[in-house]
Amino acid sequence: MVLSMTLEQKSRISKRLQRLMKSGICPAEDVSKYASELKQLIQEIADEKVIKTQSRLFKALADKTRLKILTLLSIREMCVCEVMVALDLTQPTASHHLGILEKANLVKSKREGKWVFYCLPDKRVISLMREFGGKET
């Protein structure tokens, strides 16, 4: 979803770019041309599909419960009821978090009869979590 800027917001941004250019920090000469170049730059370097996937991934990782679920699944595959017990969650809450992790491709599920088991398709995410969290294995 792209939010449009008001004329007042556009005016403020234009004034900021003008101040930047006058300071000599920015070598551009025309504000509107420079603004267009900046917009073109992001279109060239950012693939919207990739950005959407990355956003989903980071949103999935931005929750303590989901991080705990990933840590549990780094030990072994588990069914929803095991995750529920370990983290003291209700079934709907556990399923909700697992669903978010699955949409972000951080976990995968398999059904065995009435049971649904979850596992990590790639354990590198745990290594990265530990690396960024400062905990050594």
Image: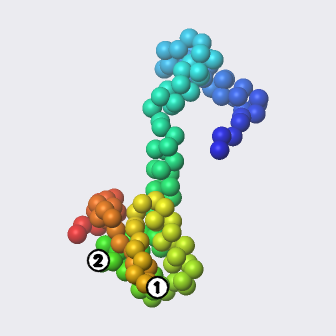
Q: Quadrant of the C terminus?
A: bottom left
Q: Is there any visible trace of residue 92 in the rendered image?
A: yes
Of 10 and 108, nearer the camera is: 108
Place of residue 60 in the rendered image (x, y in percent of width and height, measured from the top left): 48, 62
Of 100 and 68, nearer the camera is: 100
- Above or below 137: residue 125: above
Q: Count residues near mark 1 (Cα–Cα under 10 Å), then give few for <14, some for 14-19, many for 20+.
A: few
Q: Residue at x 50, y 19 (%)?
A: 26
Q: Which mark is residue 90?
A: none
Q: Residue at x 59, y 15 (%)?
A: 33
Q: Quadrant of residue 87?
A: bottom left
Place of residue 116 in the rendered image (x, y in percent of width and height, measured from the top left): 44, 79
Report the side of 1 relative to 29 (left or right). Answer: right
| Disc 2: which residue | 75
| Disc 1: which residue | 114
Of 34 and 100, nearer the camera is: 100
Q: Quadrant of residue 73?
A: bottom left
Residue that extends furthest to the top in the rendered view of this protein: 29
Q: Residue at x 40, y 67 (%)?
A: 107
For label 1, the SS is loop
Q: Quadrant of the N terminus?
A: top right
Residue that extends furthest to the left in the rendered view of this protein: 137
Q: Residue at x 69, y 40 (%)?
A: 3
Of 2 and 110, nearer the camera is: 110
For label 2, the SS is loop
Q: CA distance from mark 1 to mark 2?
A: 23 Å
Report the side of 134 relative to 34 (left or right). Answer: left
- Above or below 6: residue 115: below
Place of residue 18 in the rendered image (x, y in percent of width and height, measured from the top left): 62, 19
Q: Count residues near mark 2 (Cα–Cα under 10 Å), then give few for <14, some for 14-19, many for 20+.
A: few
Q: Looking at the image, is mark 1 or mark 2 earlier in the sequence?
A: 2
